[in-house]
Amino acid sequence: MPFLTAEWKNLILVNYEMPPSVLEKYLPFGTELDLWNGKCYVSVVGFLFVNTRLLGIRIPYHTTFEEVNLRFYVRRKIDGQWRRGVVFIKEIVPKPAITFVANTVYKENYQTLPMKHLWSGDSSFISVEYQWRLSGGWQFIKVIANKQPSVIEEGSEAEFITEHYWGYAKVSEKKTNEYEVTHPRWLQHEVIEYSSHIDFQANYGLDFEFLNREKPISILLAEGSAITVKDKNTFSS
């Protein structure tokens, strides 16, 4: 039985180029940075959890909630094959129980904050926004996109960003948690407008403060799908 099942809906992915040297200290043991066309990426990702079940059980008041995270991209070679995954700098959710389980079981870096989402649309466009309250002020990411979805092209940047199916968490300098995330290939909505207010230093620390002055190199809106998160495997030296 999967550890967690849910639907991930309307994923905003805001992508920045990152100096690889900044991320080296965050790399879990046994992984290396995964680059696309020689570029190292970090992404701010906001989405909605729907129909969430933990070990097949619906937990009251914990089935639908927002998440905003900052992640980067890694890979690990097993039996000559690459496993492409992500590492989270921080994941923000509004549910303390989710934070407790993720930090305790998976050794992730979850934080509980007030959150909300705003979705709207008409026959042509959709608007998707995720907000979180930090230090008395609301931060947000928001896109307006074409309502009609399209296929993500093979070999594209969008495929690189969305097609990583493993999660890695640094337990210690010589120990890593690994877990598989399964979902079908996603469709995307062409982004027409993007706006945000993110204090990168306040959210993610001094290493990421310079992103306050950088523009994203791309913004995506993925439709999402049902997902499963499988139980973790721990490996070490």
Image: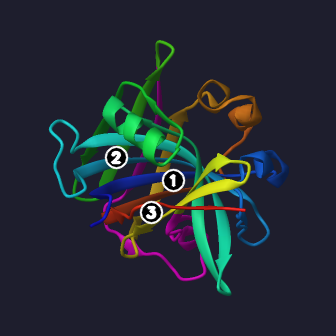
Q: Is residue 190 left or right of residue 8?
A: right
Answer yes or no: is residue 218 visible.
no
**What's the distance in space between the residues labelled 1 and 3, CA to CA?**
12 Å
Q: In this view, does 147 lie to the left or right of 235?
A: left
Question: What's the residue at 36%, 75% (across, down)?
Answer: 184
Query: Residue farthest to the top?
Result: 136
Name the residue nearer the viewer: 199 or 80: 80
Question: What's the residue at 71%, 70% (across, down)?
Answer: 36
Name the residue nearer the viewer: 210 or 206: 206
Disc 3 target residue: 190
Label of residue 127 in the image: 2
**Magenta stretch in the rendered image:** 138-166
Scheme of image coloration: rainbow
Q: In this view, does 179 lie above or below 142?
A: below
Residue 140 appears at what percent x and percent y?
46, 33
Secondary element at tag 1: strand
Answer yes or no: is residue 188 visible.
yes
Query: Residue farthest to the right?
Result: 21
Q: Does the magenta stretch include residue 101?
A: no
**What's the distance in space between the residues labelled 1 and 2, CA to CA?**
14 Å
Pick whichever of labels 1 and 3 is earlier in the sequence.
Answer: 1
Give the label, 1 or 2, closer to the camera.
Answer: 1
Question: What's the residue at 22%, 53% (across, down)?
Answer: 53
Q: Can you tell which quarter of the image residue 102 is in?
A: top left
Q: CB under 8 Å between callouts 1 and 2?
A: no
Q: Can you tell which quarter of the image residue 206 is in?
A: top right
